[in-house]
Structures are given as structure tokens and as C-alpha cells.
Amino acid sequence: MIEVTPQAVDDMMDWLSGISDAEGPGTTRLLYSPSWIDAQEQLKEKFETLGFNCEFDAVGNLFATLKGSEQPEEVIASGSHVDTVTKGGRLDGQLGIMAAYMAIEKLIEKNGQPKKSLQIISMAEEEGSRFPYVFWGSKNIFGLANKADVENIEDANGVGFEEAMHAAGFDYLEGAPKFNKIAAFLELHIEQGNYLEKEGKQVGVVNAIVGQKRYDVVLKGQANHAGTTLMEYRKDTVECFARIVTQGIDKAREEGNPLVLTFGRVEPKPNTVNVVPGETLFSIDCRHTDQAVLNRFTAELEADMRSLAEEMGIEIDIDNWMDEAPVPMDTHLVQTLEEVCKENDLNYQVMHSGAGHDAQIFAPRVPTAMIFVPSIDGISHNPAEHTEAKDIVPGIQALAGAFEKLAY
């Protein structure tokens, strides 16, 4: 097993998280911004110093490749996204890039050149923080991104996507992707939940990423005077919303893990103290690792909402605007990670990911798996996001062990 010191982890993450467009707390490194360009260029220099051959693709994904001695065409890749949310933490995304670097650095010291090629990918974008588009980096690796989806979008300051991309020195992908010949992909990430911490586990071996259904729902009743409209004559959309939430959450608890149901944004109208709310808009997020269960539960949820609304004489409009299927990880790679953990006495747990990751773009096209390390209190997308360096080390060791089995 390789030896990585917690101090080395802290030093690496302090360096990369310090490349930011704004003063702290937190790191702000948005797609095609000055700090994003700086980070990619500095990573390229660091990788080249270790002997990697580095290239950018058309849109700005950085590929650092250590050529294999016997089967160089077989590429074992790892990495994550280099962009952050506004005032994000020091680990989300960038930890996966630096974990791969530290693991390979130690393997070179231990074993020299790999038989198969090892590759680190610093992906251009995943978060959707600057522009309303996600997975721009990983989608372009496989030629999945559409020009029409981004050519007319702007950031909060009115800067167009194309303008920012061209100013950073990049452009749309034309023709076939150059770097999509990957034999296996591994992504290390903080859990962004508190399961590993609560269970006292060092490493999470991810076997699936949840599917998600998201809804916008509008209830239309009748706005009326709060003092003169008797309770039995009301068409109160907040009351209807409250009954929908209570019934839905109760059923979600009955369904049990790993299903999760969230009622998020709520906008009652006219949203004033002395008027019965005649209209309420709200959002729903439902997730599960099994598509059939997700479909069944949400179909029941929709039917229940319609039934409650009809009972109260309220109109309802349900817009299911996101429907992402669950993504299983590669069985062989999951088994490989389990073997590494057992062989090195790492306390691990096979688990699912409740959040989306670049790995979900890779997994339908390339054998893929993920490694989680614990998150303190599950906090992420926040300057308070933190994992002690000593608790990151086992994840890097698991990643290095998988590299060793796959590439050496």
C-alpha cells in the first residue's frame, strides 16, 4: 500500500483551492474565468513535471497521460471537474484531480512506468454555476454536448457562453472526440452526505448513482379575504400544498432507503398576511437507485396530488421537467475496489451516490466506478465543506490500489 501523508494532502488542496476569482471564504472558480484558466495551466505544468504528456481538448478539458510500456492504448483514467460553485469548498471536484495525481506519483516511485497508460482528466465544467448547463466537460469527452444548448445562454453578468469560451482560447468540438478511448474510469469524491461519517467507515465504494425526477407543480384555487371567507368556503392552495407534503413524506418514509423525497422551492401567491393564497408553486425532487421503484413511487405521488387537489376543488398542473435514469457502476471495477480495500484493511462500505457526478456520464460508455471519502456533517457547496486530511488518505490508497491492479 502506498504511503501518503495528511500534510501532503493538505498542502495540495490548499494550493489548488487558493486559485480563485474572489477573496474567501471559499473558492470561486467558474468555467472559462481567469482563475479557471490559471488553474488548468498550473495543473498542466505540475503534471508535466511528473512526466505526463498533457493536452487540452477543444472545449478545455485537460488530459495528462503517462504512457504505458506494454499496452499504451489501454487507458486507465481518473479525475473530476476543476470548476467550483460560487464560494464553494476546497474539496468538491478538485480533490478527485489531485487524488489521482498523488496516487500515481507514489505508484511511479514504487513501480516505475505502468504497463497500461494512466491518465488524469481535469474536466472543464460540471457544476453549472456560471451558465445554466451542467456536465459540459464530460459530455464533450464523448461528443454528447449540443452547440444549440449553449450558444445563446449567458451568465449573471450578461456574458455569453461562446464569448467566454472563445476568450479563454477554446471552441466547440468538431468531429469525433479525441480522448474518448478509455478502458476504465475511476472518480474519487467527497461523499457530500454524512453516511460514512455516521457509520465510521473510511471508504465508500459506489455501486450506483441515483436516478432523479424533478417537478414544478402549480396549484390554482381562489384568492379571498382572510377574515371574511369561512374555512368551509375556501380554496386554499397552501392547505392543499401542506396536505400533499405530509402525505408524500409519510409515503416516502414508508418506502424506506434509498428513496428520498424533497419539497423545495415554495411560492404562495399573493403571499400576504390577510389573503387566502389562491395560487401556490412548488418543486419536488425524488431520487432512487432503481428505475422501476422511482417510476412507481412518483406515479403514485402524482396520482395522490391530483386526488387531493380534486377533493379540494383546486386545479393542479404537474411538470416533470427532469427525468434522469439511475446509473449503475461497473461490477468488475466495484469488485476490484472491494478487493483493494480488503487486502489493505481499509474499512469500507458499498453504497450508492445520492448526488450526480461526472462518473454518470462516463458509466454508460466506459467501465466506471467511484470512491467516496467521508464528509464532516455532509456539508458541501459551502466554505465549511471539510474532510480531515487523514480521512482522505485511505481513499487515495484505495484509488492507487485499483490503479496498480488495472495498469501494472
Image (tube, helix red, strand yellow):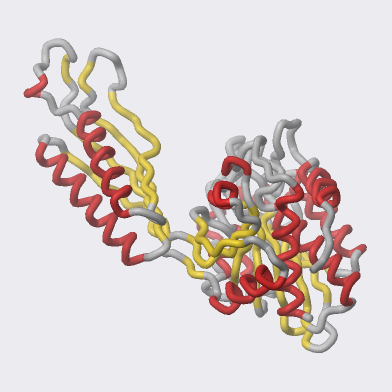
Residue 133 appears in the rendering:
yes
Q: Nearer the viewer, residue 365 or 353?
A: 353
For residue 154, which quarter of the picture? top right
Residue 145, position in %: x, y?
Answer: 55, 63
Q: Residue at 64% x, 61% y: name it.
A: 347
For the N terminus, which image quadrant? bottom right
Residue 300 located left or right of residue 204: left
Vertical comparison of 376 with 134: above or below: above
Residue drawn at the location 85% of the way across and 65% of the way down? 105
Residue 60 in view (yes/no): no
Depth check, front residue: 337 or 160? 337
Location of residue 280 in the rendering, given as x and y in whole percent from the top left corner: 27, 32
Q: Could you say which quadrant of the image residue 216 lies in?
A: top left
- Counting the numbered discs, the total is 0
Instruction: Give me the residue at 60% from left, 58% from top.
Output: 136
Residue toward you, 255 or 35: 255
Q: Position of residue 75 (x, y in %)?
A: 72, 78
Find the residue positioned furthest to the top. Answer: 227
Q: Is residue 315 left or right of residue 261?
A: left
Residue farthest to the left? 232
Which residue is painted at 80% across and 41% down in the image?
A: 18
Q: Quadrant of residue 316?
A: top left
Taking the image as shown, residue 198 lies to the left or right of residue 271, namely right
The extreme bottom residue here reads 70
Quadrant showing the C terminus = bottom right
Residue 32 drawn above or below residue 55: above
Find residue 125 and report its horizontal and vertical position in percent: 64, 54
